[in-house]
Amino acid sequence: MNYTDLNRLGGIGANSSLYQVGSFRFVVDSGIHPKETGKASLPLLDLLNGEPPIDFVILTHCHLDHLGSLPLLLKKYPDVPVFMSLPTRMLAGRMLRNSVNVMKRQAREQSIPEYPFFSFAEVERIEHQYEALRFDTPKVLKKGKDKLEIVLYPSGHVVGAASVLVQHEDASIFITGDILFDDQLTLPGAWIPEMQVDIVVTETTRGCTQRAKGRSREEECARLYASMSETLKGGGSCLLPVFALGRLQEIMAMLHQAMKRGDIPKSAVFSAGLGLDLVDYFDDIAKDTGLVRFRRRILHELKVGEPRYPKVPGQGSMPPGIYVLSSGMMVEHTPSYQAAATLVGSERNRIHFVGYCDPDTPGGKLRSAKQGDTVSFDAYDLNVKLRSPVEVYDLSGHADREELLKLVEGMEPEAVVLTHGDTEARSWFKEHLTQHDGSCKVLDPEPGRTYEV
Ligand SMILES: [Zn+2]
Ligand SMILES: [Zn+2]
């Protein structure tokens, strides 16, 4: 197999890789970097110019670090099929339309001339290229006498997320995609084949994060509910910044269950933005495919309302309750950013982080701030003294590093390719995989370089 990592800046970044297996060439994912803007946020799609054309694309799931530049890739290849799971096909258009809106706004506010990278019309046009595959059902592709088979397996990470098995006479390859083994309320954990393969391409998100003892998913939920109860009983508000796709719906399902069981007192719940809109899609996916456990009525039963922000951020107050708002990293101008500007100034409120935050984002900065520190909300020219306790819960959407190690070792590959992780996270995997099996080749690819694996 030939492998080229197209993720321009390495790290988690704009995921995309080019594979050549036998006579087949294909691209897995075409994301955008969540922190960068303009061209720097794109994968190295230019490298595909002048190369022989690709035969197909595989989209592992709908988070934008995997999907966000797909229309640009398909501009080069307007006829190739894009294979994905059924839920992913139901969500992709909605996620990309949201991207168009965000880019249009950024074009105005930050004057980025190349935005938007694509239009609503282009998002619609590429949908005819989408081909949904059922999980655990092989798709056979033929090219002359050459034959290749792909199978998607549910990878637990978010609704529709898939791991991919590629089988060819030359090699069998297992691509984990973003993967989570824990069961969530809305989604069962990954289900993958027990088999030997030649090459594993693995995500490495949590290579630097060891799960602390006593921090299992259940224990973290219990700790979260206890803290939220204390806040709510004291008349304060809880802010949970969440990713719109997956985490928002999971938290809503958790709150619904916790209030029913009396783990947290019945309280007002506020939400807004894309994540709330995606609830309708989750409802359809649940009805049509059974591949997610979520119904729209959860929101009705929680009586979710629109947040009411003060006219001037940071001045005034917001009604007490639970605020479940995107974005997860509190990117400027998002509902979670707007709410935080007002909520963090009171010791009665608490901020509960339940997912990954890049350290350079406003969320990441707030996470590392201490009570009494001044936190800046640059978008409003606002400095606030942090009085709310800020808490972090290990409810990651990614497998623990030990679990991934076990998965890879169980497949007894001759080679492992590392993706989707920071430099140090990859180093941890490289060291531990080599320790286990000295003959296993571990590749931490340089972006843009083609390797024979
Ligand atoms: Zn993801
Ligand atoms: Zn990802």
Image: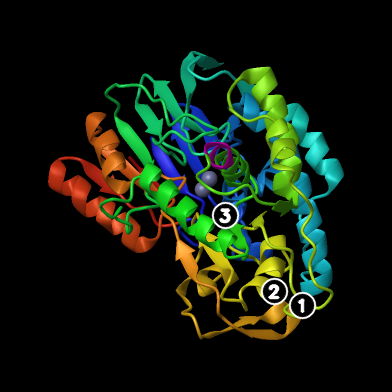
**Amino acid type assigned to the residue bearing label 1 in the image:** Gly
Mark 1 to mark 2: distance in Å?
7 Å
Residue at image location 79% in from the left, 67% down from the top: 309
Q: From this viewpoint, is residue 325 visible?
A: no
**Amino acid type assigned to the residue bearing label 3 in the image:** Leu
Element type at marker 1? Answer: loop
Element type at marker 2? Answer: helix
36 within the magenta span: no
Q: Are marks 1 and 2 in contact (CB under 8 Å)?
A: yes
Give the foreground label among 2 and 3. Answer: 2
User: Left or right: where does residue 373 sit relative to residue 30?
Assistant: left
- Comes first in the chain, label 3 or label 1: 3
Where does residue 367 sit, x and y in percent of width and height? 49, 70
What crowding class fits label 3: few (fewer than 14 Cα within 10 Å), some (14-19), or many (20 or more)?
many
Residue carrying label 3: 44
Specify the segment rendered in magenta: 257-261
Q: Which mark is residue 316?
A: 1
User: Which image quadrant for residue 256?
Assistant: top right
